[in-house]
Image (spheres, rainbow, N blue to C red):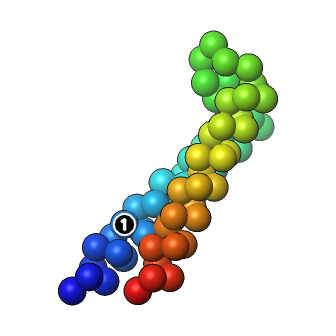
Amino acid sequence: MESGPAIFAGAVFALFGGVLLVWTGIRVRRGEPVAQGVSQLASVTLASLAAMVSLGLGAYCLTRL
């Protein structure tokens, strides 16, 4: 009964983290800002860190089945 919510949460975290990482990479490759009014290095670092944390949480949820 508890595996259903864990699968859902893991999939949501993994999907969000993957999409955020791809989106950040595309913005950087095009030379567009990731966040308005923030330095490029800081915004890329923070977005990448958030994506990696989200991917890690997704992996954690999916391994706890």
Q: Which residue lies furthest to the left in this view?
A: 1
Q: Is residue 26 left or right of residue 2?
A: right
Q: What residue type is labelled 1?
A: Ala
41 up-or-down from 9: above or below? above
Q: Quadrant of residue 41?
A: top right
Task: State which quarter of the image contains the N terminus.
Answer: bottom left
Report whether residue 26 is seen: no
15 up-or-down from 25: above or below? below
2 up-or-down from 20: above or below? below
Q: In this view, does 15 lie to the left or right of 46?
A: left
Give how far across and how far down residue 45 sits, in percent.
Answer: 72, 38
Decide which of 22, 50 is in the foreground and name it: 50
Give how far across and how far down residue 23 sits, in percent.
Answer: 60, 43
Residue beneath the point at 35% across and 75% down: 6
40 up-or-down from 62: above or below? above
Decide which of 30, 63 is in the foreground and name it: 63
Residue that carries the numbered disc 1 in the rendered image:
9
Residue beneath the point at 59% across and 51% down: 51
